[in-house]
Amino acid sequence: MLERISRREEFDLFVAWIAISLAFAIIFLRGIGRADPVIALLFLGISLFTVGIGFILHEMAHKFTAIKYGFWAEFRKDNIMLVVAVALAALVGVVFAAPGATVIYDINGRGISREQNGKISVVGPLVNLLLCIPFAALLIYGGGGMSVTGNMVTMIGMIGLQVNAMIAAFNMLPVSVLDGKKVFAWNKAVFVIMILAAFGALLVSFYPEAFSSIL
């Protein structure tokens, strides 16, 4: 299946991955209020790892599900939105994670059905929700609570959980070209389950101590 990834798509994924990772790293650095170069590199490295897994698997889920239905699909970066994402992170402290989209069409001129579009759309956020599980396990294994000088496993678990929860929750919003709008149009019950799960994971990612106490 990897031969379906073109050189252009590889380049677009790489550029988008770097930009979104930088945006998330800026957000986390703003959160701790420290600008130490070593700490900055540490957060950038963790962001590259966690965002790389979450973002790339999200887009590949869209791509290969579309291919399963017989469509052509490739990720295309949006340079303007990448600049906006980094700028908003630096100036406002918000990650607007819309680095591009997986473009889908059929060479035979077939139209994509509402069900196909919904299923292709839902798998991206679903992958991110599933990724929240191993990152949450790392967070619990590391002892909960993140500290800059604390357990590296805990930091990776915390950031990985937050990144994937953010990506899932943002993409499930039923607006514009986001996945949530297409899922809502296809199956409202699936939409409700997914958006509740996504925002539930997001809430847990910011209050891990409460989650750990329940367990």
Image (cartoon, helix red, strand yellow):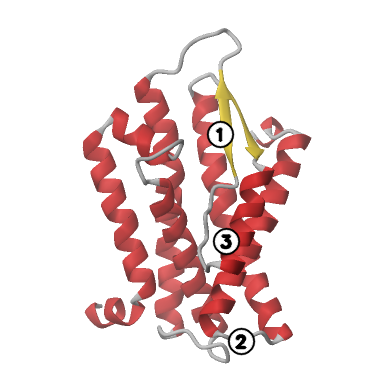
Q: Residue 121 in the image: x percent, y percent? A: 43, 36
Q: Sequence-wise, which precedes: disc 1 or disc 2?
A: 2
* Screen quadrant of the C terminus: bottom left
**Which residue is label 1 attached to?**
63
Indicate the amino acid at tag 1. Lys
Residue furthest toward the right? 7
Residue furthest toward the bottom? 149
Nearer the observer: mark 2 or 3; the answer is 3
The answer to which quarter of the image holds residue 88 is bottom right
**Which residue is label 2 attached to?**
34
Residue 132 relative to residue 101: left or right: left
Secondary-structure class at tag 3:
helix
Q: Foreground residue, 86 or 73?
A: 86
Crowd rating for badge 1 (residues with CA inside 10 Å; few <14, some 14–19, many 20+): many
Nearer the observer: mark 1 or 2; the answer is 2
Residue drawn at the location 29% of the way across and 61% of the way down: 200
Q: Residue 55 in the image: x percent, y percent? A: 56, 51
Q: Residue 61 in the image: x percent, y percent? A: 51, 40
Q: Sequence-wise, which precedes: disc 2 or disc 3?
A: 2
**Which residue is label 3 attached to?**
88
Indicate the amino acid at tag 2. Arg
The answer to which quarter of the image holds residue 52 is bottom right
Indicate the amino acid at tag 3. Leu
Q: Foreground residue, 183 or 119?
A: 183
Crowd rating for badge 3 (residues with CA inside 10 Å; few <14, some 14–19, many 20+): some
Q: Residues under labels 3 and 1: Cα distance?
A: 28 Å
Q: Is residue 151 above or below residue 203?
A: below
Q: Residue 31 in the image: x percent, y percent? A: 51, 79
Residue drawn at the location 38% of the way across and 73% of the way down: 206
Q: Residues under labels 1 and 2: Cα distance?
A: 38 Å
Residue furthest toward the front? 91
Q: Is residue 144 above or below residue 204?
A: below
